[in-house]
Image (spheres, rainbow, N blue to C red):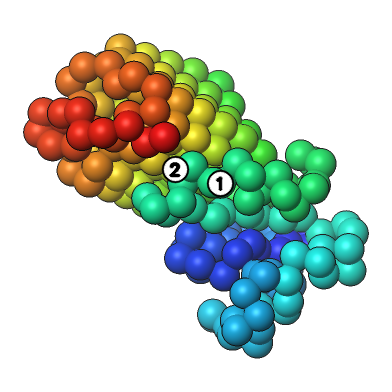
Amino acid sequence: MKDLLLFPFGGNARESLLTILAQNKAEPTWDVIGFIDDNESLLGKEYCGIKVLGGTRILTDFPTAQILAVPGSPENFLERHNIIDRLGLPVNRFATIIDPSTRVAPDAKIGRNTILMANVIISCSVVIGNHCVVLPNTVVSHDARIGDYSLIGSNVTISGYCRIGRACYVGSGTRIKDHLTIGSQCLVGLGSCVIRDVPDGTVVAGNPARYLRKTT
């Protein structure tokens, strides 16, 4: 069993805990020590019996524990890079978590501090970067690439040879046509159908997805 801390005490981390518990049921792997969060009002809060132990300063109290850092939402996804990097941890301190119901092709590559939740399908020759979150029931088809710090919602279909850039947020229920590129720091709205490339730093939504505004 490997010690594990979850950061922060938000929706992504609590959902991640469900994946970790499922993984432990299939094969005992992680001893979840607790959540960490710099919001002092959350101290002592718990989920599934796992408590918030304190702020990020307590990382030094657990020098051998691995970390799963999964901040981010449509409102602050552009800050994920800075939030995670401020932890000041080497990449080998970060865990990779894969739900036992997920199917991952043998030649797929999954980065550190990346979580694949329930019933995700990762097909052949897929590459998913570091610090990514993939929510349940999403399909990433053959030869697709997902860049570092990106969040992919639930029930998303990413078709073959797609490229998702760094620090993107792809909303739940989205469908992305094959061979497309979604640039870095993009937001794709819920339930979108993407049929053309999306430039860097762009918000798109709709069926078909249309330009709404810039993200920065």
Q: Looking at the rendering, in which quadrant would you find the N terminus?
A: bottom right
User: Where 193 falls versus 142 (above or below)?
Assistant: below
Q: Which residue is mark 1?
A: 80
Q: Within 10 Å of the Cα at label 1, are there few (<14), some (14-19), or many (20+) other Cα atoms? A: many
Left or right of residue 176: residue 148: right
Q: Residue drawn at (39%, 40%), measured in percent from left and top?
A: 169
Q: Nearer the viewer, mark 2 or mark 1?
A: 1
User: Where 179 falls versus 202 (above or below)?
Assistant: above
Residue 110 quadrant: top right
Left or right of residue 137: residue 1: right
Q: Earlier in the sequence, mark 2 or mark 1?
A: 1
Instruction: Tell me whether the residue at label 2 lies in contact with that at label 1, contact meaning CB atoms closer than 8 angstroms.
Output: yes
Q: Residue drawn at (56%, 46%), measured in percent from left and top?
A: 80
Q: Position of residue 34 (x, y in %)?
A: 69, 73
User: Where 174 falls versus 48 (above or below)?
Assistant: above
Residue occupying the far bottom of the picture? 44
What type is the residue that disc 2 sits on?
Leu
- Total labels: the figure holds 2
Q: Within 10 Å of the Cα at label 2, are there few (<14), some (14-19), or many (20+) other Cα atoms? A: many
Left or right of residue 71: residue 62: right
What type is the residue that disc 1 sits on?
Arg
Q: Which residue is mark 2?
A: 151
Q: Position of residue 159 (x, y in %)?
A: 29, 23
Q: Residue drawn at (60%, 41%), measured in percent from left and top?
A: 81
